[in-house]
Image: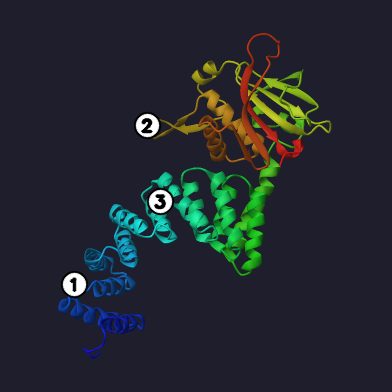
Amino acid sequence: MQKNEAPDQRLDVVARRALEGDVEGAIAELRSVVAESPDDEAAWLTLGMVFSSAGRWREASEALARAVELDGDVLAGRMAFARALEKSGKLDDAAFQLLQAQRLAPQDVRPLKELGAVFYQKGLYDKSVQFLTRARGLAPDDARVWYALGLTQEARRDPGAAIAAYRQAVSVDPTFADARKTLADVLASMGEHEQAIAVLDDLLRLERTNEQAAMNREVLAKALEEMRERRLLGKTERDVEASALVQEGQLKRRGHVPRADDDPSAVASVVRYGTGLAEMRVGLTERGTIARLMLVLPDPEKAARKRDTVFRVTVVGTSGQREPANYATAVTLTFLREALGAPLTQASELYARLLGGERSIDWSGAKLCFASVARPEGEGEALHGLSVTLLSETGAT
């Protein structure tokens, strides 16, 4: 290279040299340039970019820090410096540089996207959502923004918002395979196996040789079949009588009770099963299939004091060790497992969500919520319990 070349042209030639594979030669020449011109911001920026391309993030950070020190109003320098800091694990410093970049270009979506990613890595999901939502406003047709927003909503335990974001990412870019895969995963984790299978079917139409997607679909289809086979919803009273709730829990059939005010229209009659500690109400359609199940604890405090020796459910105690659950917890989790055909871990998660304040949960074609019913004798306060309703029987979507 000739010394009399214009500075920008000289830097372009060096950068092209790095892109063509001679990274070390480019770095050596750039070191020579900054030694000759230590206040050349463009040379420091180019050196930092070349170090970044080689994954040498510490050296990149040092070079880019000098470039930003010389001229902090260059957006590319701030963004590159932030990326090098993030790759070096210095997330707080990366966030600071991105905030400066965002102030330089408030209508540029890139700093907002990167801020969302950095705060996601820091576990500050609410902040991540704030920046990604702003990015979405500037670039509503950017599928990557929607995808990042979905990941963050999922991390902050808002699966509904995550699903909506993933669906929008797929809508914006139907070829976005990662968005489809992640959407299928979160749907499956919520028990929405049918919807997850439909998403994987769409993915397989795009990528016919995607063996992992095909395998996942096969696993989900089998799980869906097993779930439908196990769950009491949609079955008959004979299946209730054969269930663990009745057999192990020794719930006795105590005849019919009046329909509750909030029973779905599909419920034609209600059969009551119970013991001194627990009661289950079974809402049957005219065809005799189960449209609703409700578990009631007549004396919740007594049930919570009693150790479970019936269902053998264990929970993680305050010590971090697994220990037997109390009767109230054990019968409730067994009820959800049997009603939905779900694994006990999934039943535990759903119950925790209700206890955490969610008014109702739609899961695998069923609606879960807390509800109240009159006492069988018709006197005293109402009984409160856990209700599971088959949505397809009510016409709900």
**Mark 3 = which residue?**
120
Gap between marks 3 and 2, in whole Å? 30 Å
Q: Quadrant of residue 180?
A: bottom right
List the single residue furthest toward the top: 379
Report the side of 36 relative to 51 (left or right). Answer: left
**Mark 1 = which residue?**
39
Q: As shown in the figure, which amino acid type bears the numbered disc 3?
A: Tyr
Q: Nearer the viewer, mark 2 or mark 1?
A: 1
Q: As shown in the figure, which amino acid type bears the numbered disc 2?
A: Ser
Disc 1, SS: loop
Q: Residues within 10 Å of mark 3 (few under 14, many from 20)?
A: many
Q: Nearer the viewer, mark 3 or mark 1?
A: 1
Q: Quadrant of residue 322?
A: top left
Q: Mark 2 vs mark 1: which is more N-terminal?
A: 1
Q: 353 or 309, which is in the foreground?
A: 353
Q: Residue at x 34, y 63 (%)?
A: 79
Q: Quadrant of the N terminus?
A: bottom left
Is residue 49 among what the camera can see? Answer: yes
Q: Residue at x 61, y 16 (%)?
A: 298
